[in-house]
Amino acid sequence: MSYTYPLPDLAHYDVSPKTGFLPETLPLTSLPSYYQPWERVASIIPALLLTKRIRSVVNQLPALSTSHLNSEDQWRRAYSILGFISHAYIWGVSEPTNNLPQQIAQPWLEVSQHLRLPPIATYAGLCLWNYKLILPSDSDDDFVDFMDNIQTINTFTGSTDESWFYLVSVFFEYKGAPCITTGLDAIKYARSGNTDQVISSLQKLAELIDYLGSLLMKMEEMCDPHVFYFRLRPYLAGWKNMQDAGLADGVYYGNEKTSRVYSGGSNAQSSLIQTLDLLLNVSHHSTGTALIDAKEENPFMKEMRNYMPGKHSDFLVHLSKVNVLRDFVLTNKDTNPELVLAYDAAVAMLKSFRDKHIQIVTRYIVIQAQKSKTLGSETTATLRAGLAKADNGKSSGGMKKEMRGTGGTALLPFLKQCRDETGNAAAGSWGKRILTYKRPDVKKENITNVADDVIGLGAQWRDDKSNTQAGHW
């Protein structure tokens, strides 16, 4: 990390101070007329899946060239709809197929290469570039009140539940934009030695992260866990670690002689989440390693950067070279305890956010997986639940198996370790005492009680604006 390396220029990385990792202009809703064969299929995917005609219709599509894509928003739109069509094709009939037709595979490969993304349905294609206005806006700013005025462009199921699942992520990214600018401000002030401004920025960052956690819980308002797990989740799966779902060797793209293996769509592909980690210097290591002394970087987190738009991944690399906040706090902790408190509060809010994520995963995946045994035959269960065969907790030999996410990783161990590693970033002795994982010198009940108290401070500080001045926060 460097105090002299230039701070990232957000515009250079397609990151907006207003919309974060969402594009500043609304995503394109339809490609030019040349590409209408793709658009027609994408618009009726729910009906084609219902009637099991998706493969026969896609097989009749013409071979279209990507040479008619003339703008970045067109490339993004093409990537999004080709992802929907391809995942519906692979997973949408009785048994998955490992062959994707050339007329879809070739343009998908070319579009993916242009955007520096893998040819798979990613967080970017499903969420970042897949929403539109419900009603036309009278404002010159299309994002005025957009939180109450957007809907998804495409879905697999046509359900409100699926749309809400994607839109909560859109809300999350939009409301997370101030985290990026506030974090960069904190780094700027740390470089100039302006401790009071660093404290103020960290206080604001803690409040912003606390709000993101509350926003995540909105998932429960309009997305039913049963619908998500048994109707939507199968289509989000990729081609990696999917042997138990009937896809053993990846997928052959068109005329290629070697199959490709990719992880499916995952919230781990959100650049915002990794940005928060980098801003607070939270380190993640290989799942299952000892948390206190682990040194090896988590390969899944690193791999997920390859599933982000290329410029967003570049932004994270740049940020990793300038994220000096924890060093600054540690250097000044003996002379400025308020600085340490502000930093540890931000860490506590990020850990609380990860606790809420685990709550969502438990309700939407773990509990639902336990229900899959009531679906009937094993073949039916595998088809309807997608990953349920692996999620049942038993392999065919009776051995206990680990539940996996659509990204292909062991689900709960990964998420719990990420949460625990977040707490390990605490800088002060008090923060370490209540946030660090498995401290041998602190009783578990004391950790729980005190941690609940400090996490609750986030909401109190957020609401009590009169206490946000330095010295009183």
Image (cartoon, helix red, strand yellow):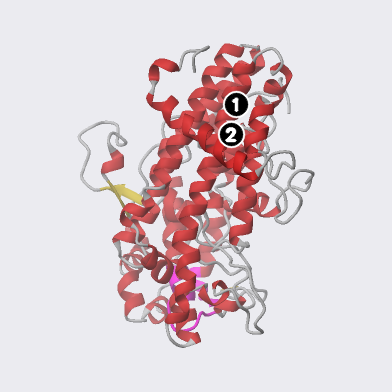
Q: Taking the image as drawn, is residue 24 in sight? A: yes
Q: Which residues are magenta?
A: 85-104
Q: Is residue 310 above or below residue 456?
A: below
Please indicate whether residue 323 sits to the left or right of residue 32 in the image: right
Q: Mark 2 belongs to which amino acid?
A: Val
Residue 363 image offset from top left, x and y in percent: 45, 60
- Residue under the image location 64 percent in, 17 percent down: 337
The residue that mark 2 highlights is: 347
Q: Is residue 472 above or below residue 214?
A: above
Q: Mark 1 belongs to which amino acid?
A: Tyr
- The foreground one among 422 and 194 is 422
C-alpha gap between disc 1 and disc 2: 6 Å
- Residue 329 is tagged as none
Residue 170 image offset from top left, x and y in percent: 40, 46
The residue that mark 1 highlights is: 343
Do labels 1 and 2 touch, CB within 8 Å? yes
* Image quadrant in which you'd find residue 335: top right
